[in-house]
Image (cartoon, rainbow, N blue to C red):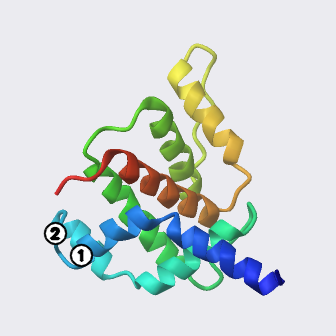
Amino acid sequence: MTWHNADVYILNNTMASLTDFFTAFDAAASKEKFTPALQSAAASIDKAALQAALDAVLAGGDDATAAGNDAVLKAGFEFATELVKMLEKEPGPEEKLGLYKYFKQARGEKPAEPSFYQMEAKFKYNAWKEISHISAQKAQALYIKQVNDLINKYGTRA
C-alpha cells in the first residue's frame, strides 16, 4: 500500500466514523428536523469544507489544525454544541466530562484549579488537564466526534 492509498483509507474511515453527526447535520440543513436556530446554523456551513477540515484534523497529531478551514471547523463545533442538546437521553457523567474537556480546550478556556475538597471541579479540571496540550482545532474535531458517538448511542429528538 502506498502512502497515498493509506492516506485515503484513513480519510475515508474518518468520514465514515462521523456518519451520525452528518446525518443530523443534513436533517438540520434540509429543515427536516431540529429547531430553526439549529437549521439556520447548519445551512450556513459548507459541508464539504467541514468534512475536509475534520478529516485533516482527526487524521493529524495533537497539534493538528484545519489548514485554512479554521472558520468552518469552528462553525461545525458551534453547531455540535447545540446539536448535543437535542439528544434523546442525557449523557452520563463520564460522557459529560468528555464533552466538557474538549469544549474548554476548543474555546481556549482554562478551568480554575479547584481546591482539594471541590471534587466535581477537580474531576473537570483533571479531565481538561489531560488534553490541555492539544490544539483548539483538534479539540473541536474531537468534540464533534464525541457528539457523533452520543447521537449513535442515544439518538436525537426533533
Q: Nearer the viewer, residue 69 or 56?
A: 56
Q: Is residue 56 visible?
A: no
**Looking at the image, is 129 positioned above or below residue 33?**
above
The quarter in which the N terminus is drawn is bottom right
Q: CA distance from mark 2 to mark 1?
A: 6 Å
The crowd level at tag 1 (other Cα within 10 Å; few <14, some 14-19, many 20+) is some
Q: Position of residue 23 (x, y in %)?
A: 34, 69
Q: Nearer the viewer, residue 146 or 8?
A: 8
| Residue of label 2 | 36
Label 1 element class: helix
Q: Quadrant of residue 25?
A: bottom left
Left or right of 67: which side holds 6? right
Residue beneath the point at 63% across and 63% down: 138
Q: Position of residue 38 (x, y in %)?
A: 25, 67
Q: At label 2, which amino acid type do we have?
A: Pro
The quarter in which the C terminus is drawn is bottom left
**Looking at the image, is 43 positioned above or below residue 83?**
below
Q: Answer yes or no: do the residues labelled 2 and 1 have beta carbons within 8 Å?
A: yes
Left or right of 100: which side holds 43? left
Q: Quadrant of residue 134?
A: bottom right
Residue beneath the point at 38% across and 81% down: 45
Q: Position of residue 58 (x, y in %)?
A: 64, 66
**Looking at the image, is 91 positioned above or below residue 61?**
above
Q: Position of residue 115 (x, y in %)?
A: 62, 20
Q: Is residue 115 visible?
A: yes
Residue beneath the point at 50% across and 33% down: 94
| Residue of label 1 | 40
Q: At label 1, which amino acid type do we have?
A: Ser
Left or right of 152: which side holds 131? right
